[in-house]
């Protein structure tokens, strides 16, 4: 009897591990304090975009997001406002769509371009078709924010990871604006008081192994 229970327990653990790996394909990635590597991803205008393209930037608001997730849609205007508020201060938004198009056809480059035009995006909207950059960062949700502080021409330190604010529904309900507070701290020469908050959103649609 005990042997049977042990076998069943082992099977349940194996299934649980497989489930976690299936939903969060990469549990590693950058931590606060790590240095993020540059990337080169295609934008909706057909051009490639890299962090190195922004020679005068002080840092970046890198956001993994998409067209289709209800949470991403709820945060969409807030992402637009972040770029409008902070791009001129040296912290532009760079949005990256990581979803596998075979699982979410409405996250195709064509649909991304349509949405960006309709919503008036003022920032690049890139596709990570290989999902290699998404895995390198460790993003698991849409939206998922990585705030980078540029320390040198090729050194981008991760200063904050997680949610945009504490209200996944209405912007007016937000009491804590994590990303804004973190950027304001960096602009004043300080370290963010809050460096991570769990990202709330849809799971990224990973390619089948």
Image: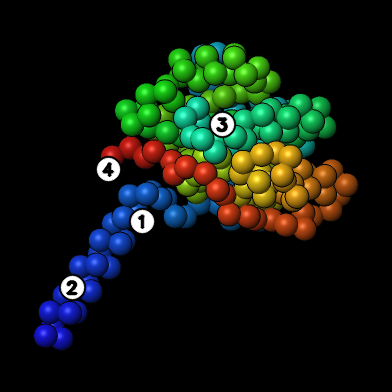
Q: CA distance from mark 1 to mark 2?
A: 18 Å
**Residue 178 location (% of width, % of height):** 72, 49
User: Which residue is rendered at x = 33% and y = 49% of the image?
Assistant: 22
- Residue on which disc 2 sits: 8
Q: CA distance from mark 3 to mark 2?
A: 42 Å
Q: CA distance from mark 3 to mark 4?
A: 28 Å
Say if mark 1 contacts mark 3, CB within 8 Å: no
N-terminal label among 4 and 1:
1
Please name which of the two marks, 2 or 4, marks the residue nearer to the observer.
Answer: 2
Left or right: 99 in relation to 85: left
N-terminal label among 1 and 2:
2
**Residue 89 location (% of width, % of height):** 82, 32
N-terminal label among 3 and 2:
2
Per the image, label 3 sits on a secondary structure element best described as helix
| The C terminus: image quadrant | top left
Instruction: Identify the image's colour scheme: rainbow, by chain, secondary structure or one colour.
Output: rainbow
Say if mark 3 contacts mark 2, CB within 8 Å: no
Please name which of the two marks, 3 or 4, marks the residue nearer to the observer.
Answer: 3
Classify mark 3: residues with Cα within 10 Å, few (<14), some (14-19) or many (20+).
some
**Residue 42 location (% of width, % of height):** 51, 22
Q: CA distance from mark 4 to mark 1?
A: 14 Å
Q: Count up the numbered dots.
A: 4
Q: CA distance from mark 2 to mark 4?
A: 26 Å
- Residue on which disc 4 sits: 209
Per the image, label 4 sits on a secondary structure element best described as loop
Any part of residue 162 in sight: yes
- Residue on which disc 3 sits: 73
Classify mark 4: residues with Cα within 10 Å, few (<14), some (14-19) or many (20+).
few
Per the image, label 1 sits on a secondary structure element best described as helix
Per the image, label 2 sits on a secondary structure element best described as helix
- Residue on which disc 1 sits: 20
Is residue 173 or residue 47 the one in the foreground? 173
């Amino acid at each position: 009897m005990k042997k049977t229970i042990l076998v069943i327990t082992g099977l349940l653990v194996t299934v649980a591990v497989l489930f976690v790996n299936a939903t969060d394909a990469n549990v590693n990635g950058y931590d606060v304090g790590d240095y993020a590597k540059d990337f080169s991803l295609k934008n909706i205008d057909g051009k490639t975009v890299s962090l190195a393209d922004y020679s005068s930037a002080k840092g970046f608001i890198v956001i993994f997001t998409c067209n289709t997730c209800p949470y991403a849609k709820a945060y969409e205007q807030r992402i637009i406002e972040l770029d409008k508020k902070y791009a001129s201060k040296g912290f532009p938004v760079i949005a990256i769509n990581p979803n596998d198009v075979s699982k979410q056809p409405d996250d195709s480059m064509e649909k991304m371009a349509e949405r960006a035009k309709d919503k008036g995006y003022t920032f690049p909207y890139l596709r990570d078709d290989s999902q290699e950059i998404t895995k390198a960062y460790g993003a698991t949700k849409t939206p998922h924010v990585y705030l980078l502080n540029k320390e040198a021409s090729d050194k981008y330190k991760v200063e904050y990871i997680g949610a945009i604010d504490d209200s996944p529904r209405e912007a007016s309900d937000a009491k804590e604006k994590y990303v804004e507070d973190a950027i304001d701290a960096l602009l004043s020469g300080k370290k963010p008081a809050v460096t991570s908050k769990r990202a709330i959103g849809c799971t990224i649609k990973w390619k089948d192994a």
